[in-house]
Image: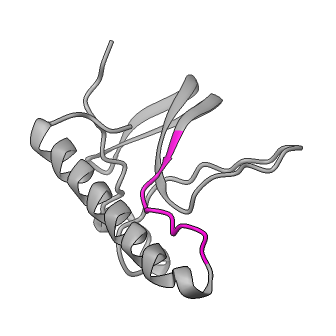
Amino acid sequence: MIMKEISLEIERENLDSMAVSEGPRYPVLHYDGDEELDLPCCGTMTVVFKVVGETSRERNGKHSYSCDIEIRSITNVKSAEPKAPASSGSEAGSALDKLAEEYAKHEAEEDDEDDTGEEKY
């Protein structure tokens, strides 16, 4: 079953005025374990999960929902930023050319995904 992409941005009006910061706010996934995760700074991934608790309620005429999600596995991690090739000294020009190619490829992939309506998770 494929579900639509769900935006997790929390609207500013639902935040406590003392906690408001610049930009959108998103739920946070906290990991605490024996092994270090080798994740890129930002990107996409596939998450296998199980909902282990949820609450839906009306308060002062406003609906709120919360849930606890158990993360079973994280797979298909892809960086959202191109990596610079390892290079030194006289190879700097080649390294910059390679980085420009990777960046152009990354931008083209993003444009293709936006145009096709393909869902990202």
Q: Residue furthest bottom?
A: 89
Q: Is residue 20 visible?
A: no
Q: Is residue 98 magenta?
A: no
Residue 41's x, y, as percent?
55, 63
Q: Which residue is more in the foreground, 74 or 55?
A: 74
Q: Which residue is more in the foreground, 51 or 62?
A: 51
Q: Identify the image quadrant of residue 51.
A: top right
Quadrant of the image for the C terminus?
A: top left
Q: Residue 80 vs residue 91: left or right?
A: left
Q: What number of labels is visible?
A: 0
Q: Residue at x 14, y 36 (%)?
A: 117
Q: Residue 61 vs residue 80: left or right?
A: left
Q: Residue furthest top?
A: 1
Q: Is residue 53 visible?
A: yes
Which stretch is magenta? 77-87
What is the basis of the colouring in this image?
one colour
Q: Residue furthest right?
A: 34
Q: Residue at x 64, y 28 (%)?
A: 73
* Above or below, comparing residue 97 to residue 103 in the picture: below
Residue 113's x, y, as percent?
21, 43
Quadrant of the image for the N terminus?
A: top left
Residue 93's x, y, as percent?
44, 82
Residue 55's x, y, as percent?
48, 32
Q: Residue at x 67, y 50 (%)?
A: 30
Q: Residue at x 30, y 46 (%)?
A: 7
* Above or below, comparing residue 109 to residue 88 in the picture: above
Task: Give the main secondary structure of the magenta stretch.
Answer: loop
